[in-house]
Image (tube, rainbow, N blue to C red):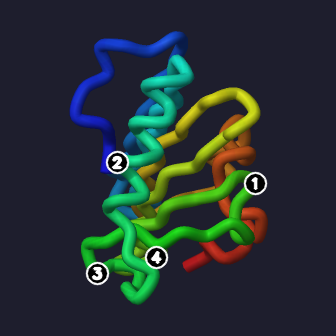
Amino acid sequence: MFPDSIKEFADGQYVSKMNLDTDDSFEYTILRIKYSEDDYNAELERLSNMGDAKSEVGSGNLIYDDKSYNYPAYIAKDGEDNVYEYVLNNENEREIIYVILSNPIVSEMKEWYEYLKIDRNSYEK
């Protein structure tokens, strides 16, 4: 789901955090890329070709969702084994945000709330 290459982009940010403490283990990885117009359109095309409107989340195809997040999303995993994997499309900024969460602890991700589900309580175990 992440891009094959990130050689050409206008701006970006990468953050990854992992806590392997046995009681409260979690991990998150977020890659935000601001693309040129052509690269942005090409990446959206790549993502839309990975989708299948008849698929279920977790089937290997991406599901489009424009209601659960602050931005339209392509979802690969939505809580299966407490893993969330999705891509957000910030059209106004030509940014695409790639997100992987494992055992998310919302309080550990306060600066990334914008990229989490609108209903953050849905992440509770």
The x and y percentages for residue 20 are: 32, 50
Residue behind mark 3: 59
The x and y percentages for residue 125 are: 55, 79
Q: Amino acid at mark 4?
A: Gly
**In the drawing, what numbered circle is on residue 79?**
4
Q: Is residue 27 above or below residue 29?
A: below
Q: Is residue 83 above or below residue 115?
A: below
Left or right of 18? Residue 92 is right
Q: Nearer the viewer, mark 4 or mark 3?
A: 3
Q: Are marks 1 and 3 in contact (CB under 8 Å)?
A: no
Left or right of 45? Residue 97 is right
The structure residue drawn at horizontal position 42% and vertical position 34%, both measured from the top left corner, is 16
Q: Name which of mark 3 and mark 2 comes first in the sequence.
A: 2
Rounded to the nearest angstrom, the CA distance separating label 4 from label 3 is 13 Å
Q: Name which of mark 2 and mark 4 comes first in the sequence.
A: 2
Mark 4 crowd level (few <14, some 14–19, many ≥20, 10 Å Cα): some
Q: Secondary structure at mark 4?
A: loop
Left or right of 5? Residue 84 is right
| Quadrant of residue 101 within the rendered picture | bottom left
Q: Amino acid at mark 1?
A: Asn
Q: Amino acid at mark 3?
A: Ser
| Quadrant of residue 124 within the rendered picture | bottom right
The x and y percentages for residue 24 are: 46, 60
Q: Nearer the viewer, mark 3 or mark 2?
A: 2
The structure residue drawn at horizontal position 44% and vertical position 15%, both measured from the top left corner, is 9
Q: Name which of mark 1 and mark 4 comes first in the sequence.
A: 1
Q: Are marks 2 and 4 in contact (CB under 8 Å)?
A: no
Residue behind mark 2: 46
Residue sitting nearer the eye, 4 or 13 = 4
**In the drawing, what numbered circle is on residue 70?**
1
Rounded to the nearest angstrom, the CA distance separating label 1 from label 3 is 24 Å
